[in-house]
Image (tube, rainbow, N blue to C red):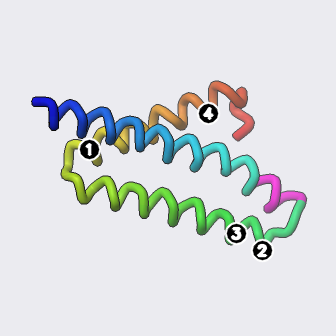
Amino acid sequence: MTELVLSIVFGGLAGVLLGMVHFYSLGRVVEMLVHGPAGLGLLLQLFRFAVLGAGLYGIAQLGPLPLICAAAGVVLARSLVLRQTDGRV
């Protein structure tokens, strides 16, 4: 039972952390693509997806339940970032 709770909590928190990093960095990518060096913006975009993919892959190694919780955490982080930035991201 304790292992189940820990995997749910770990997956959710890891997903929120991954999602916050992913969606906060989106603002920087957009700024680079519009105003700054577009090539660097594209590299940052690829890095964002690589970090999110690697993080979710690592969590998937723990089992399906932590992965589902992590995915829910990413969706929750999206809502939190949009709310904090007033939809500017």
The Cα atoms of the two marked residues, 2 and 1, are separated by 35 Å
The Cα atoms of the two marked residues, 3 and 4, are separated by 21 Å
Kind of residue sitting beneath label 2: Gly
Q: Earlier in the sequence, mark 2 or mark 1?
A: 2
Kind of residue sitting beneath label 4: Val
Task: Give the number of the disc on residue 88.
Answer: none
Residue 5 among magenta residues: no
Q: In the rendered image, which residue does mark 1 sit on?
A: 66
Task: Give the number of the disc on residue 81.
Answer: 4
Foreground of the two, 54 or 30: 54
Q: What residue appears at the point 67 percent right and 50 percent down from the top-left corner? A: 25
The quadrant in which residue 53 appears is bottom left
Q: Would you say the residues marked 3 and 1 are in contact, meaning their CB atoms lie under 8 Å apart? A: no
Kind of residue sitting beneath label 1: Pro
Q: Secondary structure at mark 3?
A: helix
Foreground of the two, 53 or 13: 13
Foreground of the two, 58 or 36: 58
Q: Would you say the residues marked 2 and 3 are in contact, meaning their CB atoms lie under 8 Å apart? A: yes
Point out the frontmost of discs 1 and 4. Answer: 1
The Cα atoms of the two marked residues, 4 and 2, are separated by 25 Å
Q: What residue appears at the point 28 percent right and 43 percent down from the top-left corner? A: 68
Quick check: 25 left or right of 37? Answer: left
| 32 in relation to 4, above or below | below
- Per the rendered image, the range of residues in magenta is 30-35
Kind of residue sitting beneath label 3: Leu
Task: Please provide percent x and percent y for residue 67.
Answer: 29, 48
Task: Give the number of the disc on residue 39.
Answer: 2
Q: Earlier in the sequence, mark 3 or mark 4?
A: 3
Q: In the rendered image, which residue does mark 3 sit on?
A: 42
Q: Earlier in the sequence, mark 4 or mark 2?
A: 2
